[in-house]
Image: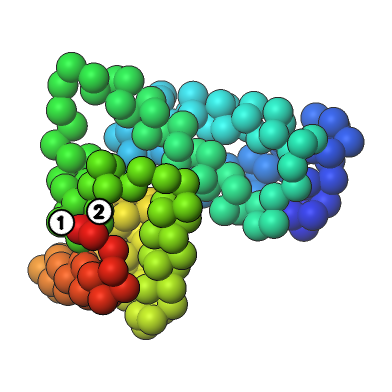
């Protein structure tokens, strides 16, 4: 079923929308949730929460790209669940991924207004357009899907050390790109 047909089912409050969403994007959303939470039960819970949030969101807005709409909801719910689960303890894997990006993105204290945040998002999107597709996929797989180095190397048929070097270089390129555009890091 096409995305616009699934969205129409949601719009018409047809419960078949959830089954069709799960059929088409269930594995994708579960992959995102599991990469963040590293727990099958929590991932399944997030998947159900995603469908509920989509069910409640679509009557008021029509997503342009349904897959990205689902991914964003799944990712945000997963990160929220991760933070809740790990409020008193640290998840080393998640901390490592977030720390990798810390050195090339501005701190929360420098983004004081929504417009500055939107400018940063625009800069990130423009940066991603400047890098080759294969590197863009690696970057997004690591920092959007929060995939492990091992999974990325396996998926791209690369050595783990090559993935690490590629990500390191991309972070440096991102940092230089943002500095040249006046973003305070």
Q: Position of residue 6 (x, y in %)?
A: 78, 47
* Disc 1: which residue: 103
Q: Nearer the viewer, residue 18 or 71?
A: 71
Say above or below: 62 vs 48.
below
Which residue occupies the extreme right position in the image?
Answer: 12
Q: Position of residue 131 (x, y in %)?
A: 35, 80
Q: Position of residue 127 (x, y in %)?
A: 37, 73
- Number of numbered discs on residues: 2
| Horizontal side of residue 80 vs 89, given as left or right | right
Check disc 2 and report its element: helix, strand or loop: loop
Say above or below: 139 vs 134.
above
Say above or below: 60 vs 135.
above
Quadrant for residue 155, please give it: bottom left
Quadrant for residue 153, please give it: bottom left
Residue 106 badge:
2
Residue 62 badge:
none
């Amino acid at each position: 079923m096409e995305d616009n047909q699934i969205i129409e089912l949601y719009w018409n409050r047809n419960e078949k929308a959830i089954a069709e969403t799960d059929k088409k994007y269930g594995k994708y959303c579960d992959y995102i949730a599991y990469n963040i939470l590293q727990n099958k039960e929590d991932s399944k819970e997030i998947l159900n929460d995603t469908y509920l949030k989509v069910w409640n969101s679509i009557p008021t807005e029509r997503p342009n790209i349904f897959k990205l709409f689902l991914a964003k909801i799944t990712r945000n719910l997963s990160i929220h669940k991760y933070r809740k689960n790990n409020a008193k303890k640290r998840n080393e894997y998640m901390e490592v991924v977030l720390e990798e990006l810390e050195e090339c993105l501005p701190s929360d204290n420098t983004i004081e207004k929504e417009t500055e945040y939107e400018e940063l998002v625009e800069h990130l999107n423009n940066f991603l357009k400047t890098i080759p597709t294969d590197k863009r996929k690696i970057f997004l797989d690591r920092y959007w899907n929060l995939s492990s180095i091992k999974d990325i190397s396996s998926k791209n048929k690369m050595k783990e050390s090559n993935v690490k070097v590629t990500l390191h270089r991309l972070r440096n390129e991102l940092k230089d790109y943002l500095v040249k555009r006046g973003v305070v890091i």
